[in-house]
Image (cartoon, grey):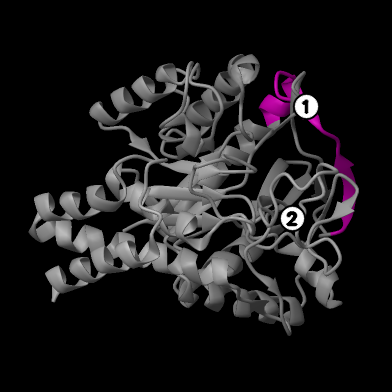
Amino acid sequence: HLWVVNHLRAEPLAEFYGVEPWSPEHWEILKNFAEDMALHRQSMINPPMFPLVKVIKDKKGFSFDFTMYDHFVELFKKAGVVGKIEGTPLGGSDRKTVSLPEIQILNSEGKVAYRQPRLNIRSPEARDFLSKFLPALEKHLGEKGWLDIYLQRIFDEPRDEDAKEFRFLSSMVKEFSPKIKRMEPILSVDLEDALDVWIPPLEHFEGGIGFDRYQNFFRELQKQGKEVWFYTCFSPRGSYPNRFIDFPLIKQRYLHWINFKYDLPGFLHWGYNGAYKIWGRLYWNYRNEFCCGIQRECYAPGDAFIVYPGEKRPLSCLRYEIHRKSIEDYELLRSLSNRNPKLAEEIVDSVLPSITGYERRIEKFNSVWRRLVEALS
């Protein structure tokens, strides 16, 4: 099975479609999105931890209500997406400090008491909060039978200069919830034992001068039996496969052939529906749909989304359908490998000898794909 997560932005859908957040109408829209994700072979979901988990504080201290979180997971599970559950990042980094997010705190009557400000992870207040929340989360996941499918993120894309703080926050996750596994898309390998699932960018598996360090590191992790996935985000470009609007579709078709060839059981992407405001811009709209809006130039056209806004449901596109086909190709290759691993490897190598050295002729690819299907007939 290939673990695939394209990040869903759930809350902005309510604003986009003009409904109250977490109202019955919002849940119905989310149901439509869940069914679409399942249809396109997504096998992992990223529920927004807060506000779905209600944080309550009274004289006895913190307590947590997971009712809405459970409803979200069960909705996507029923649709066929879960799979696995991605725990949204516990912290955020501004490259100087790492902090827990601002969190709404309720009183015992369920009314807003105050908003807990962003807390530096090294503060006593942050440690106190995590020492209550993480054990409660682990206990709840165990009671729901989700502990084995849950993966907790730490903070997004740590670089070498973030490694110390990343290891520190990850160590608290291990201390307070030792049964919870940790995952993260990363830009550093200086993380020691801070992760259970490592997710480097695609270019770290094949690159130019300076990338040997990454390639050797991840190969060694795999030899040790560690789980390694890959992700793409604004890059790579050039001859690398990716899902940008201005790339030939054949380049996207190879993404999950790479998963098979390099024994990478998962793929993460940040942009399923870019319907949200960030950096002062609206990603998903009809006027700015080709540029991400982060830069003035069109550096990564289409990277923020792979579906368009339909009538209270996502509207597909060619890239989305090719994404599904690529996942299905992985499943076919895995099925063949279970019967005849040498033949599966030979078929992949005939069109994908390396990450950037793939066959670009469509007719050649199609003939190899037919060979794959016939081998399974």
Instruction: Residue 228 in the image: state x and y as whole percent.
Output: 38, 37
The one nearer the camera, 17 or 66, is 17
Residue type of the residue flagged with mark 2? Pro
- Quick check: can you spot residue 200? no
Q: Disc 2 or 1, which lies upstream in sequence? A: 2
The one nearer the camera, 365 or 196, is 365
Q: Taking 287 as reference, is 213 above or below it? A: above
Q: Taking 210 as reference, is 69 above or below it? A: below
**Mark 1 closeness class: few <14, some 14–19, many ≥20 residues within 10 Å:** few
Q: Nearer the viewer, mark 2 or mark 1?
A: 1
Residue at left 80%, top 54%? 108
Q: What range is drawn magenta here?
A: 111-128
Q: Is residue 340 left or right of residue 366?
A: left
Q: Is residue 211 left or right of residue 63?
A: left
Element type at mark 1: loop
Residue at left 34%, top 37%? 227
Instruction: Residue 12 in the image: state x and y as whole percent.
Output: 79, 63
**Residue 126 belongs to the span the image colors magenta:** yes
- Quick check: can you spot residue 264? yes
Q: How many marks do you count on the picture?
A: 2
Instruction: Residue 83 in the image: state x and y as whole percent.
Output: 42, 61
Q: Which residue is mark 2?
A: 51
**Residue 123 belongs to the span the image colors magenta:** yes
Q: Which mark is residue 280?
A: none
Q: Taking 217 as reference, is 7 above or below it? A: below
Residue at left 54%, top 37%? 185
| Figure quadrant of the N terminus | bottom left
Q: Taking 104 as reference, is 27 above or below it? A: below
Q: Which residue is mark 1?
A: 94
Measure the C-alpha gap from mark 2 to mark 1: 22 Å
Instruction: Residue 187 in the image: state x and y as whole percent.
Output: 56, 27
In which quarter of the view is residue 18 placed? bottom right
